[in-house]
Image: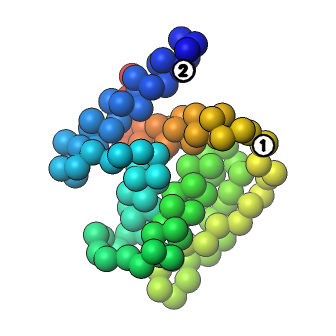
Amino acid sequence: MFKKDLDLEKRWSKLLDGLKETIGKKPSDLNGVLFLIGVQELGQGNKTFSKEQKQDLMHIAVCKVLSYDGFYELDFVDQEGWPHWKLVKELPHFDLLEQEKYLKIQVLEYFEKEYEIEIK
């Protein structure tokens, strides 16, 4: 493993530990963190979501974190309060491992920007 991969994993582990302290449960993986971001971005609090809504929440999260690099921008919020994003720049082609690393980096940036915390 490269040093930058080790650094990423250390920062990721620190984020997961911090989330456990904040919400009382440690997310099991990237998808769990994306779900939390989606719920936060929806802004309707913690409630029961259908399977389809959970997928939509993860999509909201992916769009939000990728918006920092200019891939998505918020298009509109519907009458039920759900944000809708539009793709404004073609996404890079990554293999699954690179895609997960990139999303983790963007998720870390989300927490650093939105909550003004430094995860080192």
As shown in the figure, which amino acid type bears the numbered disc 1? Answer: Pro
**Which residue is rendered at x = 35% and y = 46% of the image?**
28
Residue 119 point in image, percent of width and height: 38, 29
**Which residue is rendered at x = 50% and y = 76% of the image?**
52
| For residue 24, above or below residue 56 | above
Residue 77 point in image, percent of width and height: 56, 77
Q: Kindly identify which residue carries mark 2.
A: 5
Residue 100 point in image, percent of width and height: 58, 40
Dot 1 or dot 2: first in sequence order is: 2
Numbered tag placed on residue 92 in the rendering? 1
**Which residue is rendered at x = 78% and y = 43% of the image?**
92
Q: Secondary structure at mark 1?
A: loop
| The one of 102 and 44 positioned closer to us in this rendering | 102
| For residue 4, above or below residue 61 | above
Q: Secondary structure at mark 2?
A: helix
Among the 4 quarters of the image, the one containing residue 18: top left
